[in-house]
Image (tube, helix red, strand yellow):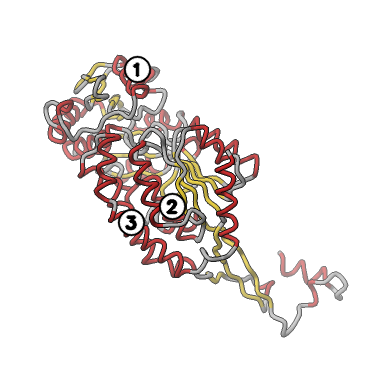
Amino acid sequence: MDSCTALIRKQQAFFETGQTKPLAYRQEALRQLGNAIRKHERGILQALRQDLNKSEFEAYASEVGIVLKEIRFVMKHLRSWARPRKVKTPLTHIGSRSSIYPEPYGVVLIIAPWNFPFQLAIAPLIGAIAAGNCAVVKPSELTPRTSEVLALLIRETFGAEYIAVVQGDAETSQALLAEPVDYIFFTGGTAVGKVVMEAAAKRLTPVTLELGGKSPCIVHEDANLKLAAKRIAWGKFMNAGQTCVAPDYVYVHQSVKTAFLDHLKRAIDELYGANPLANASYTRIVSDKHFRRLQAFLADGVAAAGGQSDPNALLIEPTVLTEVSPDAPVMQDEIFGPILPVLAYQDIGQVIEAINRRPKPLALYIFSESKPIQRQVLNDASFGGGCVNDTVYHFTSPYLPFGGVGGSGMGAYHGRSSFELFSHRKGVLKQTTLFDIPFRYPNAKHALRWIKRFLK
């Protein structure tokens, strides 16, 4: 698309002027972004209600407030992150000094998903701005009202040569991926992630993939069952389960399965009421296609809680499935909806083996009071990140890198990790001219003997 080509060229030209690199420019851009979000807060919340029926509480906590907090954190620490960092120099390099210089890549393409359509567009943008890049944001067409507000917010705040929003469908994303951008940041499903990586490979463009996967949750026999059930229900059913780090399925120790299920049912009632389908603040499924896919999963087990749906309103109750076969369709792909299979286990080692046989998940959660059990799970299972005795909360910490591993993605961001993700770390050695080391040269006397002595 000609318009995409023109925009990328415009941003490349602006980046080459060097205006985005000074620290003061980045700090001011972040300040303006924060002010714009606060100015448009009401419109953002309304758009999220229209697109996904998100309550004001959930929309602010998970979409608006979290990015405002990230902006404040980055602005507070950016000066120290951006300065060149001195590192040690080996004895063989006597007379020299070594430093790492962070520098921006150039033009960054950010492709955002629909499940948290504001937060997952703005959060990587904060890192791109902090590192000194220009950026093009492609929001999801499945949440059009939020995309409109996002486009308006950015258009009012920045020139298109610096930050721009490009709306459109998959064809628009493909057109942007065909452009010679300097970095690609994609959040979404694994299938599309492979397409993005293939496009990046054609130009050897560095890429970050924030994908997903079936994130397991383990409830051991010594867990605080009441608290575990409440935190699992909160992490699973927020945004109607349409969260990349939501617990996808639960392994609960056989000896406490019945008690855990009782607590889980009560937690769902406490959070969403006896009739969630009548709860005006309960998030809906994003589209009819996604609804029909999720509804088919309801037949893969016995509903211990929930199980009802409303196709006209695109609503599915928070549902807990038991008697689920590990080979059932609901256990094959990431659910990405308000359906939680619960399986029983006897041996924690077998659970870890079962998890490791699957593609590596984005998150893992272990509920146990036993430090040896916690260590065993954390050391023996591979996953992007997670929590002990909680769910999802690791995602909200600016001190923790957030990202996947293997099939759940590559690269990590949030806080300092965002700045480092969008920065090339340029290694520089400054050598003295006051003297020279003769044995580095092949014509020096006994050069080989000296080299062997130093390099052993």
Q: Which amino acid does label 2 sit on?
A: Leu
Q: Nearer the viewer, residue 131 or 379?
A: 131
Q: Position of residue 96 (x, y in %)?
A: 65, 76
Residue designated by label 2: 125
Residue 286, by quadrant, is top left
Q: Name the residue under label 3.
A: 36
Residue 141 spot, x, y in % from top left: 41, 34
Left or right position of 309 against 433: left
Q: Are marks 1 and 3 in contact (CB under 8 Å)?
A: no
**Label 1 crowd (10 A; few <14 / some 14-19 / many >=20):** few
The amino acid on which the numbered mark 3 sits, given as a three-letter code, is Ala
Instruction: Name the residue type under label 1.
Output: Ser
- On the image, numbered disc 1 is attached to which residue? 325
Q: Is the C terminus in the top left, top right, bottom left or bottom right quadrant?
A: bottom right
User: What percent of the width, then of the height, locates residue 13?
Assistant: 60, 57
Q: Which of marks 1 and 3 is nearer the N terminus?
A: 3
Front of the two marks 1 and 3 = 3
Q: Tell me which numbered mark, 2 or 3, is placed earlier along the sequence.
A: 3
Q: In which quarter of the image is the N terminus?
A: top right
What residue is rendered at 19% in x and 37% in y? 230
Instruction: Tell me the CA gap for discs 1 and 3.
Output: 49 Å
Q: In this view, does 40 lie above or below 175?
A: below
Indicate the secondary structure of the residue bearing disc 2: helix
Residue at image position (34%, 45%) is 149
